Image (cartoon, rainbow, N blue to C red):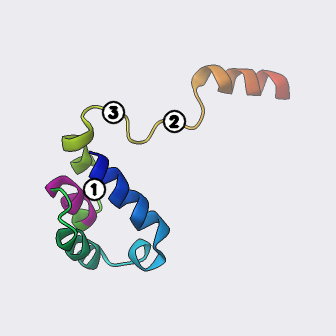
């Protein structure tokens, strides 16, 4: 998992990788010996493949929880 996180960080820092086609990104990840899950996620654009490595961790947590939203709307009224 640490290697996957490091590769995701490297992709985020590298503009040419961030804007690469899914096929080019998958090829680069295969060359970097990335996990099958990360390579499949890059090739398909489907982040659910990463659940194989990260387990049941919520990869896309909500930006605002219901409790905070209620407080925000109460203040605005």
Q: Is residue 40 magenta?
A: yes
**Marks 3 and 1, the one that precedes in the sequence:** 1
Which residue is drawn at the image coordinates 84% and 29% (left, top)? 76
Please state, as top left, top right, bottom left or bottom right, where the C terminus lies in the image: top right
The magenta-colored residue range is 36-42
Q: Residues within 10 Å of mark 2 (few under 14, many from 20)?
A: few
Q: Closer to the N terminus: mark 1 or mark 2?
A: 1
Task: Report the residue at 26% width, 45% height from top.
Answer: 1
Give the residue pinned by disc 1. 46
Marks 3 and 2 close (CB-CB < 8 Å): no
Q: Secondary structure at mark 1?
A: loop
Answer with the quarter of the image where residue 33 lies. bottom left
Residue 62 is tagged as 2
Judging by the rendered image, the residue that carries numbered circle 3 is: 57
Say which of marks 3 and 2 sits in front.
3
Question: Residue 65: percent from the left, percent from the top?
Answer: 58, 27
């Amino acid at each position: 998992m640490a290697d996957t996180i490091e590769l995701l960080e490297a992709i985020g820092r590298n503009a040419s990788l961030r804007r690469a086609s899914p096929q080019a990104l998958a090829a680069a990840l295969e060359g970097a010996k990335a996990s099958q899950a990360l390579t499949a996620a890059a090739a398909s654009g489907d982040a659910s493949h990463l659940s194989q490595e990260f387990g049941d961790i919520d990869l896309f947590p909500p930006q605002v929880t219901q409790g905070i939203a209620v407080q925000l709307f109460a203040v605005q009224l």
